Amino acid sequence: MSNLERRYRLLLRVLPRWYRQDREEEMVGIFLAERDDDLDLEHSWPGWGETGAILGLSVRTHLAAGAALTSVPAKVVWRGEVVRALGMIGLLLGVFYATAAIVNLAVGVAGPFPVWRLLELGPLVALPALLAGRRTPAKVAAAAPAVLSVVSLGQPEYAVTWSVFQLPSLVTFACLCLGFHREAPTPPARRLLWWGGGAALLGVLGGFAAGVGLLSVGLITVVVRVFAFVRGDFVLGRALSLFALLQLVPLVFLVVAGSEVFVPAAGLALLLVLVAVAPVRRQRVRV
């Protein structure tokens, strides 16, 4: 085995085992076709284009969706659906905060509204774009609040606190980008427009009570998790369990810091722990 072949096989290890078992030899043969120079085989590396293509394929196969993939294990199908659901939850969370920011501005709760805060309104553009199948514009718009979060980390005095409170948004944004790859299905518009409208309505209510957004989101998570269990919705239930774990990080920070919301934060943290470990009803998947 030449060094180049070894390097290609090492690169292919980012693909899931079930996919490599069927395609690895074929792919290596294609990569090495017409490369018979001894120096090339010993000293060359996979090209940037090939590496990018394999990494993209890795995302699509680990979060499988679409008719192009056959013989996909059921657990891979579930994983892809849960990641996409978690990404949608994060987008709805962004709609909630964006609507609350607009209400804060309208009623003067939050004081002056700097121009840079317009980036917080990105989810209001991202949701309809995603439901219309415009994935790249949706991801760009959803990235706007994430940019604010990353930029804020450059301020040392706020880096730790801000990163703790932005963790749920950043992780769900990553799920949105990874889950909705080019072969993933477009979310059902009618159902998610209802969810988006509910998130906006709750954002309006939250806008009149500044400072309780985190607690409100936690309570909503608990209620919807119970709803998912009653309906037997495994994907939504599992995604909400993971989202509950993400929310525990800022809540535990509030509890440890001994803030003025210590008692409600501690109680909500306990509820979220129960939500995270509660069983979910698993339905059968047709592959």
Image (cartoon, rainbow, N blue to C red):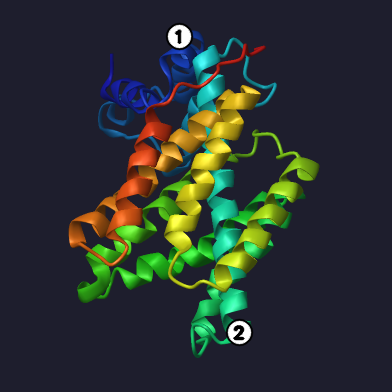
- What SS does tag 2 mark? helix
The quarter of the displayed image where residue 245 is located: top left
Residue 269 versus residue 32 in the image, above or below: below
Q: Residue at x 36, y 23 (%)?
A: 13
Q: Which mark is residue 81?
A: none
Q: Position of residue 99 (x, y in %)?
A: 62, 68
The quarter of the displayed image where residue 179 is located: top right
Q: Which mark is residue 107?
A: 2
Residue 70 versus residue 120 in the image, above or below: above
Q: Which mark is residue 21?
A: 1
Label 2, label 1: how many angstroms apart (C-alpha)? 60 Å
- What SS does tag 1 mark? helix
Q: Nearer the viewer, residue 128 or 4?
A: 128
Q: Is residue 130 left or right of residue 141?
A: right
Q: Residue at x 54, y 44 (%)?
A: 87
Q: How many marks?
A: 2
Q: Nearer the viewer, residue 122 or 195?
A: 195
